[in-house]
Structures are given as C-alpha cells and as structure tokens.
Image (cartoon, rainbow, N blue to C red):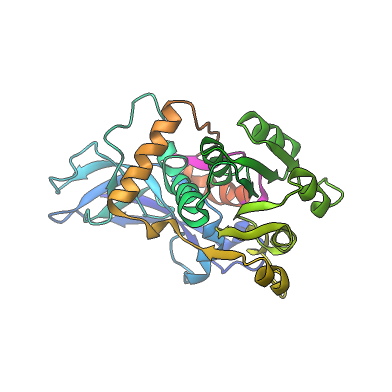
Amino acid sequence: MVRAKRWTLKTQFHGFPKNSDFELKTVDLPPLNNGEVLLEALFLSVDPYMRLASKRLKEGDTMMGEQVARVVESKNPTFPVGTIVLVHAGWATHSISDGQALQKVLAEWPDSLSLSLALGTVGMPGLTAYFGLLNICGVKGGETVLVNAAAGAVGAVVGQIAKLKGCRVVGSAGSDEKVEYLKKIGFDFAFNYKTVTSLEETLKKAAPDGYDCYFDNVGGEFTNTVIKQMKKFGRVAMCGAISMYNSTGQLLPGPSPEHMIYGEIRIEAFLCTRWQGEVKQKALKELLKWVLEGKIQYREYVIEGFDNMPAAFMGMLKGDNVGKAIVKI
C-alpha cells in the first residue's frame, strides 16, 4: 500500500492566496489494475495560470498542475518501471495512471540536462513562448517585440526566441536583479516597471517608433499603456494577466477602442495546448536544440520539499522567482 500526499484547495482564494487556503492530506492508493502504472513525482511545477484555473476547482479538490514523474510500479508494458513521464497529476507525491494521458520526455534528452526543464524551457512555458511568438504574433526579422514579466518562465524564452529571429527586444520586469538578467540573455532594452517614473515615457524611449509585437503576460494598466504605442497592424499575443488574478474589486476597463480600431491592432488570446502531435514535438525538439547549443539560456527557482508547495506557489505569484519556479521532491 502506497501512501500519497496531496495538497488540496481547502478554501477558495479571495485575493492573494494564504497558507490557510491549502490543506495537506494523505491518502492510501489502491493496488494497480492491468494497464495502470504507479507514479512518483520528481519535480512539480507552479505557474501563474493555477491562480486563475483554481476558480474551477471545488473546495477539497487537489491543486492542479504538471509534474515530472518516474514509473515505480507498472502493469502497462508501454511504461516499464523507470520510465520518466510528464503527467498532469496535480500537487501529489504519488498517483496512478492508466497511461492514456502520459507523455514520455523526448528520447533525445541528454543525461546532462535536468529533467526539471521539461516543466520549463523545454516544456509548457517554452511551448507557450514558441507558439505565442511565432504563430500568434508571427514575428519577422527587424521587428520590435515587447514582453512583460520578461524574467519569468515564459517571458525569458519569448525574448530569446525573438532575438534568434532577428528582432529588437524590449522587456519589463519587477526588480533590478531581473533587469540585469534580461540584459545578460540579450534583451536590447530592459527596465524595472516598479521604479520608472513613467511607463509611457519609458516605452517611448525604448522604441520611439512603436512596437510590432506585444507578448502580454500581465494585462491591466500596463497593457492599456502599451496599446497606445503599437504600430499600425500591430499584433498582441495575450498569454496571461497576472496583474489581475488576485484582484477582488472591479476590473479595469480594457484598451482604448480608438487605438485598437485606427491602429488595426490584432489581439489574440491563446493556450499552448492548441498545438499537439507532430507540431508540438517539432517545437520541443527545437527548444531542446537551442538550449543545448546555448542559444537559449535559462534559470530555475528551485524550492526543495513537497511540503513547500503552497509557499512556492505564493512566492511565484509575488515575483520571487527569476526563471521557472520548480518544486523538487
């Protein structure tokens, strides 16, 4: 009998999450049926989308999320013991799967690269950056790209892919340490949005002619300011709105219709799960190749211990992380 720990949503979040909103439970898992595998988590992901998606959970449900796990017992020949997989098993140390929703890590994955990157640069955040920038924005060489939350798991990859495609890249972040990181990985202009006197003037200074593509992770007033500086036929990839996820009051009005209409600006929201099958595998292989060649650099914010899942989640929402926030079991 295997005992699994699970972090559940004890109380629906109201505003910023609190420790009392979570409850740690222990459950006994049943014996495996034919076709099933027992998984042990190695790395778990905490991501901004969880704050938004938690509204769909009922109190008592296990917190959602993806993890890198190892098969420790198997009655499924496709996934023998020792197989490393990606699974959406939530905040749990152990889980049982029938194999239908399991994804093996890339066969090309080298031993020298931490498997945690399958939850970051060569995983969902990397795919979000890849498809949002290349498919939604459709960037071309010579264009100017703006990305906010640029030192996060998605934003840092967006900026580096844009540089690989020959773009000029402007990034905003919430600390001087993060700004220095953005400069180190090749951003042409980076600024701390918390300390600038005027966001509008800073954006104009960074790109006097305006922006062709805006990769938005923040939403709110930041986006309203950016829209006014988009070039004609500008494109916006709406990935997230972390500035608004913990809001308890009335949401801010959206961007100026005048600028949207006369600028003929296109805004498209997206989830990276839109792209599956061969196109997803091709993207993952290209991201892995860029990492191994040193063309995409990465940083991870690693927290040790399953008991620290809520703290890691809340720290990520506060912006404590540079790069991908990961919990290592």
Residue 290: x and y in percent read: 44, 32
Residue 144: x and y in percent read: 64, 46
Task: Give the residue displayed 58% in from the left and 45% down from the top.
Answer: 155
| Residue 159 vs residue 34, the one in the foreground | 159
Residue 328: x and y in percent read: 46, 38
| Viewer can see residue 217 | yes
Query: Is 49 above or below relative to 113?
Result: below
Q: Is residue 321 magenta?
A: yes
| Residue 56 vs residue 22, the one in the foreground | 56
Q: Is residue 313 magenta?
A: no
| Horizontal relation, residue 85 to residue 148: left or right | left
| Viewer can see residue 253 | no
Magenta segment: 317-329
Task: Give the residue displayed 72% in from the left and 75% down from the top.
Answer: 250
| Horizontal relation, residue 50 to residue 265: left or right | left
Q: Quadrant of the C terminus?
A: top left
Question: Residue 191 occupies which quadrant of the picture?
Answer: top right
**Number of numbered discs:** 0
Query: Is 50 above or below relative to 71?
Result: below
| Residue 261 vs residue 47, the one in the foreground | 261
Residue 86: x and y in percent read: 34, 46
| Horizontal relation, residue 199 to residue 2: left or right | right
Query: Is 45 above or below relative to 328?
Result: below
State the residue lying farthest toward the top.
112
Task: Give the residue displayed 39% in from the left and 60% down from the top.
Answer: 274
Task: Give the residue displayed 59% in from the left and 40% down from the top.
Answer: 167
| Residue 72 vs residue 165, the one in the foreground | 165
